[in-house]
Each structure stands twice: as structure tokens, then as C-alpha cells.
Image (cartoon, rainbow, N blue to C red):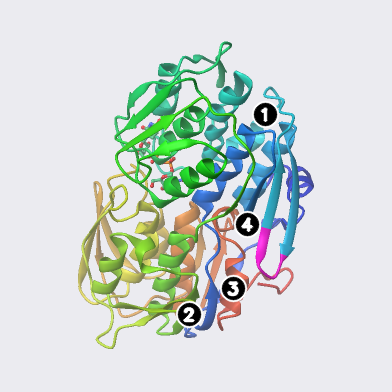
């Protein structure tokens, strides 16, 4: 999956450096040490950037992760007529978004095909412009990933939605109206879509069986600082009093809890000790006791969390992925890499996505002993992994392979690197600063 339009990405996000299809080479076996800054959350920043479409006033986001998904969304927003001003300081990447003009028809199909989160544009454009045209969105191939909950919710709010030849055409000529919506499943994206639409809709919207992920609370906080009237974010029922004219806002993106969990695994696998700056145990939900039971020590200090391996070593644990506050599906692959070298047998059951075990084949190439039966992977811990040429199959699989490579003996060559870059802000460079031997061979830069 190499980038079809690097020029449009760099025009919209000048900080973006395309991987150019390069591989990443990791020579494993070095303990990670020092300090690793956890970036702003990929899954929070995308809906936050979309929220800027709801107002003609300026929305400034701080702690923006410099990831490929952010660049793709920036390019999509730019095509819609939105101006963005980026600033990169020692405190991190910030963007000020000005959507005083929005052209809802100008969506770029190639870009939408790259990222499922582009479906979030639908609710926001309907709310702001009364119309949206969007090709059916793409993203990771990890399951069926319908968008039926998004569409049903928007229809309940009065949108007319027509699906023809892979295109979504949605209109709400006389505006959206509040509705009482029951989600069949607590979908993160659908909850965000409906929240974005509901703040501007006339009347009250109730989103029942809403997802409770911290990224939804982050979005609700930003919308509230723009003047939105939202209660219950983080619970199963979110109530939005709509019809508000939204002002601008300044918001700091929450830390990335998936990057946090991933790095905790990497520190433990390499038997290192790393300060995960901005990390907090409360972000990890059910992953915290799982990581602890598996032998990952997480110690709170003022600037974050110190992660290392327990003296007793790594031990197998059983995991079932669930919506938040359950164990995050996005940590399933990274934790599987850890459990591949833990003592004993672990059962990992994936309940959110149908095809989220594509990393198993890649970990097996490195010597992992994993058998998949339906939705459960049985991981028999081995003494160690060995380097191999592997392929990143999705964002979180890529993170799992980085963990595996850091702990393995010999050289691991990771291909299809865009998957890693989609979700992580300069992960290789940050790992190199913690002592990892990790390079992109073409330029010998991390
Ligand atoms: C978000 C996250 C992703 C994470 C996932 C689950 C972002 C950008 N991505 O994805 O990293 O893995 O939550 O925590 O935040 N579903 C439908 N119809 C719909 C919507 C969802 O059937 O209209 C199903 C999906 O196929 C899936 C389940 O519901 O089986 C949960 O998906 P959802 O929570 O919507 O995931 P995303 O928002 O796509």
C-alpha cells in the first residue's frame, strides 16, 4: 500500500515524509532504555480534526501525532476548502483549522479509500452544509466493517442517503433534527459520527448503546468547548442538545493509549526500562491488569509511566477483546507479540473484528507458536523469536511486528511500512532514541 498522491499529502501536511515504500530493518536484542514520548492519540485526533468542519471559527489542536492518517485527513479537508496552519515546536505538532468555506462535493476518492475514518466527514458535512458526497471508505482489511450504523443514525436524524456505484450521496436540505438512536453495537466511529451531526441538529439527540472509549470523551470535550451541549460522553447514553452555533476552540489531543500499551510491551519484551512520557495507567482500561499479569511492570512517576519486565519474567494470560473499558482490540496484536515469548499458553479471543489475526502468520515466520481456531488464537510461548522478513498487514499488526523484531535475535525486515506510519508518530525514530537498532535502509535514518 504505497501512497498514490504524496504531493497532495505534503501540500496539506508539510511535515509529512513519505516512506516511499521503504522497509524498516530492526536488529533485535537490545534492551530499550531512556525516555519515549507518547504522542497524541491517532483515534482521537481524526474526529477532532473533523469537528473543525462544524464552525467557521478557528479550531486549534495541540499534541497532534505526525502520522499518515493525519496527513490523509488533512488532504481531504484541504480538498473541501478548509485552510490549515501547522506549527511544529518542541512541544509537538499543532494545527489551526479554518473552515470558513466548505465545498462538500470535492471529496477525493483515492484518499477516502485509504482511511475508514473518512466516514466521519459524512455527519459533519451534512450538519454544516446539508449535503455530503463520499465514496465508500476504505481502511484496514480486518473485517467486514460496515457503515450501516452511521447511515441508519443519520437517516433517523432526517438525512436522505442514496448509495449508488460505491458512492454515498447524503442530503438534509432542511437540516438535521435530533433523534433517539439505539446503536446495535457500541461502535466507536458511529458514536462519533452521530455526535458530530447532533451538536448542530435541531432538538435533542440521544445515542444509546454508545461506545465509551476515552477518544469519544475527548471529542465531546472539544465540542463542549466550542459551545456544544453534551452530557453522558463516556457512558452508554449520550444526550446532545443540538441547534447550537459553534464557536472556535483550542484543544489538546489526549495521549495515545494504544501507543502506550505497545511501548509497555516493547520495554518488557526487550527486558529494558523505559519512561513512557505522558503515559497514565487510567488510559489502559482492562489492558492494565492483563499487562501486569503478563509480567509488565508499570510504575507511575510524575512525567508518565516507567515500564519494564517483572523479575519473575513474562507469563501467559487469557484475553478477550471487548469495547472499552474492556481489553482493546487495537492492543490484541501487540500483546500477542509479548505473549509469544511468555512462559505458558495464552488464549486470545477477538470479538470485535472478524479478520484480525493476519499478524499470526507473520509472527509465526519469526518462530512464534500460534494456532488459530475460529476467533481464538492459542499462543504457546517460545524461548525467543528470530528475525525474518515480514509484512505489516494493518496498523496494529505493524506495531506487533516491531515489538517482535525488537525482542528477536538477528535482523527483522518489515515491509509495507505505510501501515506503521498510518498510526504512529515517528515510532522508529523514537525507538532509536531509546537504544533500538532500527533503520530505514535507503537513508540510514530511523
Ligand atoms: C475504531 C478505531 C479502531 C478500533 C475500533 C474498535 C478509529 C479511527 N478507529 O474503529 O482503531 O479498532 O474502533 O475499538 O477510531 N460496525 C458495523 N457497522 C457500522 C459500524 C461498525 O457493523 O456501521 C461493526 C464493525 O464492523 C466492528 C464493530 O462494529 O465489527 C466495531 O467497529 P467500530 O467501533 O465502529 O470501529 P471503528 O470506529 O471503525
Find the distance from the CA under tag 1 to the CA under tag 3.
Answer: 34 Å
Which mark is drawn over residue 107? 1
The quadrant of the rendering that contains the C terminus is bottom right
Q: Which residues are magenta?
A: 89-93
- For this view, does 433 lie left or right of residue 179? right
Q: Quadrant of ligand 1?
A: top left
Q: Earlier in the sequence, mark 2 or mark 3?
A: 2
Find the distance from the CA under tag 1 to the CA under tag 4.
Answer: 26 Å
**Above/below status of 377 relative to 27:** above
| CB atoms of marks 1 and 4 within 8 Å | no
Q: Is residue 165 visible?
A: no
Q: Please, what secondary structure does the residue beneath circle 1 have? A: loop
Q: Could you tell me residue 36's position as x and y percent?
A: 54, 75
Q: Which residue is mark 3?
A: 430
- For this view, does 309 lie left or right of residue 398? left
Q: Could you tell me residue 417's position as x and y percent?
A: 59, 58
Residue furthest bottom in the image: 311
Q: Nearer the viewer, residue 373 or 190?
A: 190
**Above/below status of 274 relative to 246:** below
Which mark is drawn over residue 62? 4
Q: Nearer the viewer, residue 316 or 131?
A: 131
Amino acid at each position: 500500500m504505497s501512497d498514490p498522491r504524496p504531493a497532495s499529502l505534503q501540500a496539506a501536511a508539510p511535515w509529512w515524509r513519505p516512506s516511499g515504500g521503504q522497509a524498516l530493518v530492526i536488529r533485535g536484542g537490545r534492551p530499550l532504555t531512556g525516555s519515549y514520548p507518547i504522542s497524541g492519540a491517532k483515534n482521537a485526533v481524526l474526529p477532532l480534526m473533523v469537528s473543525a468542519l462544524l464552525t467557521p471559527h478557528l479550531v486549534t489542536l495541540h499534541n497532534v501525532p505526525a502520522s499518515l492518517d493525519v496527513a490523509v485527513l488533512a488532504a481531504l479537508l484541504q480538498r473541501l476548502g478548509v485552510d490549515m496552519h501547522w506549527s511544529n515546536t518542541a512541544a509537538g505538532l499543532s494545527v489551526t483549522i479554518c473552515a470558513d468555506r466548505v465545498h462538500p462535493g470535492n471529496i477525493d476518492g483515492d484518499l477516502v479509500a485509504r482511511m475508514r475514518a473518512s466516514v466521519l466527514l459524512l455527519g459533519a458535512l451534512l450538519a454544516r452544509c446539508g449535503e455530503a458526497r463520499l465514496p465508500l471508505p476504505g481502511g484496514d482489511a480486518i473485517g467486514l466493517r460496515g457503515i450501516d450504523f452511521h447511515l441508519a443514525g443519520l437517516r433517523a436524524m432526517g438525512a436522505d442517503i442514496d448509495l449508488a456505484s460505491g458512492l454515498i450521496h447524503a442530503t438534509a436540505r432542511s437540516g438535521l433534527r435530533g433523534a433517539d438512536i439505539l446503536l446495535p453495537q457500541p461502535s466507536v466511529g458511529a458514536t462519533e459520527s452521530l455526535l458530530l451531526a447532533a451538536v448542530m441538529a435541531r432538538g435533542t439527540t440521544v445515542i444509546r448503546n454508545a461506545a465509551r472509549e476515552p477518544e469519544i470523551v475527548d471529542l465531546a470535550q472539544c465540542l463542549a468547548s466550542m459551545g456544544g451541549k453534551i452530557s453522558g460522553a463516556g457512558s452508554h447514553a449520550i444526550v446532545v442538545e443540538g441547534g447550537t452555533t459553534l464557536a472556535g476552540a483550542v484543544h489538546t489531543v489526549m495521549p495515545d493509549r494504544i501507543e502506550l500499551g505497545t511501548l509497555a510491551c516493547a520495554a518488557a519484551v526487550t527486558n529494558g526500562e523505559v519512561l513512557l512520557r505522558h503515559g497514565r495507567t487510567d488510559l489502559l482500561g482492562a489492558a492494565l491488569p492483563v499487562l501486569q499479569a503478563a509480567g509488565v511492570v508499570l510504575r507511575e512517576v510524575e512525567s508518565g509511566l516507567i515500564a519494564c519486565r517483572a523479575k519473575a519474567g513474562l507469563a501467559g494470560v487469557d484475553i478477550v477483546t471487548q469495547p472499552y473499558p474492556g481489553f482493546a482490540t487495537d492492543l490484541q496484536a501487540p500483546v500477542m507479540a509479548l505473549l509469544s515469548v511468555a512462559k505458558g499458553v495464552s488464549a486470545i479471543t477477538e470479538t470485535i473484528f472478524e479478520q484480525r489475526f493476519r499478524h499470526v502468520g507473520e509472527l509465526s515466520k519469526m518462530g512464534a507458536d500460534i494456532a488459530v481456531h475460529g476467533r481464538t488464537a492459542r499462543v504457546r510461548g517460545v524461548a525467543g523469536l528470530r528475525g525474518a522478513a515480514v509484512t505489516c498487514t494493518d496498523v496494529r499488526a505493524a506495531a506487533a511486528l516491531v515489538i517482535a523484531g525488537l525482542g528477536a535475535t538477528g535482523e527483522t525486515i518489515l515491509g509495507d511500512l505505510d501501515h506503521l506510519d498510518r498510526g504512529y508518530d515517528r515510532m522508529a525514530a523514537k525507538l532509536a532514541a531509546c537504544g533500538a537498532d532500527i533503520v530505514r535502509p535507503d537513508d540510514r535514518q530511523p
